Image (spheres, rainbow, N blue to C red):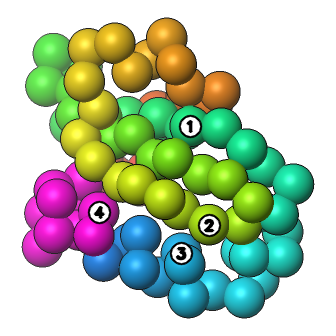
């Protein structure tokens, strides 16, 4: 399964929504999050995903579009080997 691919995102969303610890700890968080990844030394090949997080649930997980960075409450990025 390719990291940040749609199948990976679907599986991750399901895991998030089944995790009682996340449900508790994330209960006070509301807002979209954008995660970015790129191969070491090559930011021109950056991939990004957008997560709709609210009240301890992940309501959507999808590849990020060009306008998503402006809507994200939090943006986290790192080279692939760090993920």
Tell me the tag on residue 9.
Answer: 4
Q: In front of the other: label 4 or label 2? A: 2
Q: Residue at x 87, y 54 (%)?
A: 28
For the N terminus, give its image quadrant: bottom left
Q: Is residue 39 magenta?
A: no
Q: CA distance from mark 1 to mark 4?
A: 15 Å
Compared to residue 75, the image places residue 33 above or below, namely below
**Magenta region, residue range:** 1-10
Tell me the tag on residue 32.
Answer: 1
Q: CA distance from mark 4 to mark 2?
A: 14 Å
**Circle 2 residue:** 57
Q: Determine whether, in the image, residue 19 is placed left or right of residue 70.
A: right
Circle nearer the N terminus (1, 4): 4
Circle nearer the N terminus (4, 2): 4
Q: Residues within 10 Å of mark 4 (few under 14, many from 20)?
A: many
**Circle 3 residue:** 16
Q: Element at badge 2?
A: strand
Q: Element at badge 4?
A: helix
Q: Residue at x 65, y 27 (%)?
A: 73
Residue 74 position, x and y percent, is: 63, 30
Q: Which residue occupies the foreground of this view, 40 or 47?
A: 47
Q: Which residue occupies the foreground of this view, 74 or 43?
A: 74
Q: CA distance from mark 2 to mark 1?
A: 11 Å
């Amino acid at each position: 399964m390719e990291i940040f691919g749609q199948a990976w995102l679907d599986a991750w969303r399901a895991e998030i929504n089944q995790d009682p610890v996340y449900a508790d700890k994330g209960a006070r968080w509301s807002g979209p999050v954008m995660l970015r990844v790129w191969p070491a030394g090559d930011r021109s090949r950056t991939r990004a995903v957008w997560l709709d997080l609210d009240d301890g649930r992940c309501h959507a997980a999808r590849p990020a579009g060009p306008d998503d960075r402006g809507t994200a409450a939090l943006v986290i990025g790192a080279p692939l080997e760090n993920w």
